[in-house]
């Protein structure tokens, strides 16, 4: 495990050499079952969902989830049910999304304003796409809408947590070596979670104090919602630690996917200007050139959605994320493969998205492949893929509750950036290098692209 880093790439090589879509690799005492077969993935997430609905109980998950108090990393059981219900019904329900719509518009406006301001700086608009889109406001932010030191530090720490959480830490697979921290993951995770809580905890504690002292009586955001939830006896439903764990979950669940997808999609599209042209033509015909894209435009933006979906297929932020733990011995694929109790089943997001049996011209960025016509014309394309031929939000009990929010955040990011700006390569480049980083599936070099406003100035006058 120490010699073959990153482990995800090593697993990919093993499966490629064996020419298999399912494998069993023993790491420490644990059977790890990586999958690139959509059919077996579907069986596991539907017919056998009740067997595979748990998560591993390891050090990294325990540390990040505040002692298994949240949703994403928590083994199947009462705590997971409680927190998932709150997440689905109280935080990302349609009613709540409607309630927070204005805040989302404000965030989109901020982002457009920031890129617009960048265009007018340094004699013409070179934008570091990763820096801009990985950064979301946490503190006050800068005058021009950009990220300040606090936001950068906070967001970097979240990305560090995501990098190490599912990175096959020795401490998680060989617990007796945990104290030695041979790969250094434990130290990195501890440092990153400490940085995050440095920003979160005072805000959460102060907010609870405001509610308790009667200074605050109106809910304005999700933190207020979490603090105000009551049990049947009218006592607070969540403890302070549960609220903190929930906020951590929201942060790690939300931040990485949309920004990574946009960076990769734009890189691919700059190498294939035809795709950029089609996307902007669609945006101009649906939205016009006098205003910014709004969420209500989304149903009509099929080509833009296809670009996002293609980025999720080819370039998911990680090949491997949360494992599904089997709670019983079982067989899959018509009794062909035995999976023992306590195995870690891993849906390899990139392995599935790049499965050559499923996808023709596998490595080509080709948004058109997601556009299907039925007798009424083009369908309203969804980023979700229930067939699991690519993994966007998963399926079954452990599927993503944030599908609607995650989809609209991603599509709005794509749509606003492609509609509001003309993008081209820096003048000294003729092609964008599409290599992946040594660590995994992120881009090796941050994408630097030239942005120019393409709408009349009034369209950027955002209040
Ligand atoms: C484009 C954005 C997003 C993508 C692509 C995405 C994708 C995923 C995937 C692949 C999983 C794992 C499913 C599995 O284990 O089989 C997941 C789980 C989860 N996601 Fe998302 N997600 C996104 C946004 C969000 C948002 C906005 C939220 C909430 C604010 C959220 C909350 C969660 C939670 C709580 C889980 C864990 C569910 C469980 O273990 O029961 N996600 N997501």
Image (cartoon, rainbow, N blue to C red):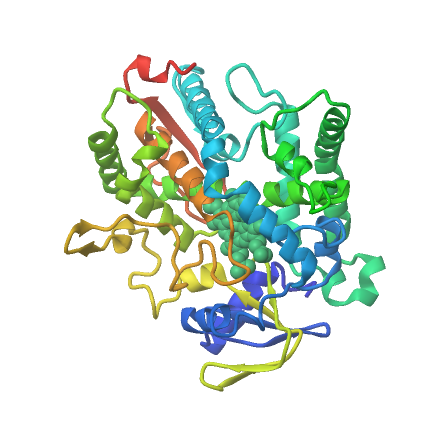
- Image coords of residue 334 (percent x, y): 45, 85
- From the viewer's perspective, tell me whether residue 323 is left or right of residue 115: right
Q: Nearer the viewer, residue 109 or 359?
A: 109
Which of the pair 229/57 is nearer the observer?
A: 229
Figure quadrant of the N terminus = bottom right
Q: How far from the left and from the top, in percent, is residue 73? A: 65, 56
Residue in view at x 67 percent, y 63 percent = 77
The answer to whether residue 421 is seen in the rendering is no
- Residue pushed farthest right? 179
Q: Is residue 146 above or below residue 306?
A: above
Quadrant of the image containing the C terminus: top left
Q: Is residue 371 above or below residue 204?
A: below
- Residue 226, horizontal then vertical, whole percent: 65, 38
Specify the farthest residue to the left: 375
In the image shown, does 111 or 6 lie closer to the viewer? 111
Residue 121: which quarter of the image? top left
From this view, report whether residue 260 is shown above or below residue 135. below
Q: Quadrant of residue 455?
A: top left
**Residue 332: x, y in percent?**
50, 80
Q: Quadrant of residue 51?
A: bottom right
Furthest toward the bottom, the residue is 335
Q: Is residue 184 left or right of residue 43?
A: right
Residue 241 visible, this angle: yes
Q: Residue at x 49, y 86 (%)?
A: 335
Q: Is residue 341 left or right of residue 404?
A: right
Q: Residue at x 70, y 33 (%)?
A: 200
Judge left or right: residue 408 versus residue 430: right
């Amino acid at each position: 495990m120490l010699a073959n880093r990153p482990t995800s790439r090593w697993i990919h090589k093993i499966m490629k050499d064996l020419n298999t879509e399912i494998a069993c690799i023993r790491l420490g005492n644990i059977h790890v079952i990586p999958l690139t077969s959509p059919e077996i993935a579907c069986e596991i997430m539907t017919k056998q969902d009740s067997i595979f609905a748990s998560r591993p109980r390891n050090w990294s998950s325990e540390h990040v989830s505040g002692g298994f108090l949240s949703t994403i990393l928590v083994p199947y059981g009462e705590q997971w049910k409680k927190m998932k219900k709150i997440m689905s019904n109280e935080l990302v329900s349609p009613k709540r999304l409607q309630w927070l719509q204005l805040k989302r518009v404000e965030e989109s406006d901020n982002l457009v304003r920031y890129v617009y301001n960048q265009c007018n700086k340094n004699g013409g608009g070179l934008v570091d796409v990763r820096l801009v889109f990985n950064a979301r406001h946490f503190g006050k932010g800068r005058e021009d809408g950009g990220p300040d030191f606090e936001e950068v530090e906070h967001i970097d720490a979240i990305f560090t947590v995501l990098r190490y959480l599912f990175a096959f830490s020795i401490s998680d697979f060989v617990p007796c070596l945990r104290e030695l921290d041979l790969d250094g993951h434990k130290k990195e995770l501890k440092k990153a979670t400490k940085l995050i809580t440095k920003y979160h905890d005072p805000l959460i504690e102060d907010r609870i104090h405001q509610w308790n002292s009667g200074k605050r009586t109106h809910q304005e955001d999700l933190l207020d919602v979490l603090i105000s939830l009551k049990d049947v006896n009218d006592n607070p439903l969540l403890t302070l630690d549960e609220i903190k764990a929930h906020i951590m979950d929201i942060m790690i669940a939300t931040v990485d996917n949309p920004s990574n997808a946009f960076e990769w999609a734009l890189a691919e599209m700059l190498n294939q200007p035809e795709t950029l042209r089609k996307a902007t033509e669609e945006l101009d015909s649906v939205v016009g050139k006098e205003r910014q894209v709004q969420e209500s435009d989304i149903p009509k933006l099929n080509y833009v959605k296809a670009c996002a979906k293609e980025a999720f297929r080819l370039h998911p932020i990680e090949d491997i994320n949360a494992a599904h733990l089997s709670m019983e011995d079982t067989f899959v694929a018509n009794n062909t493969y035995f999976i023992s109790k306590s195995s870690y089943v891993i849906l390899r997001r990139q392995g599935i998205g790049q499965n050559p049996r499923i996808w023709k011209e596998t490595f080509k960025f080709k948004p058109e492949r997601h556009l299907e016509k039925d007798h009424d014309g083009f369908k309203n394309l969804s980023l979700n893929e229930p067939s699991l031929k690519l993994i966007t939000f998963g399926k079954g009990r452990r599927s993503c509750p944030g599908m609607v929010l995650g989809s609209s955040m991603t599509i709005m990011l794509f749509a606003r950036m492609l509609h509001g700006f003309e993008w081209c390569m820096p003048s000294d480049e003729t092609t964008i290098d599409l290599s992946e980083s040594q660590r995994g599936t992120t881009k090796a070099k941050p994408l630097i692209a030239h942005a120019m406003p393409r709408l009349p100035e009034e369209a950027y006058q955002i209040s």
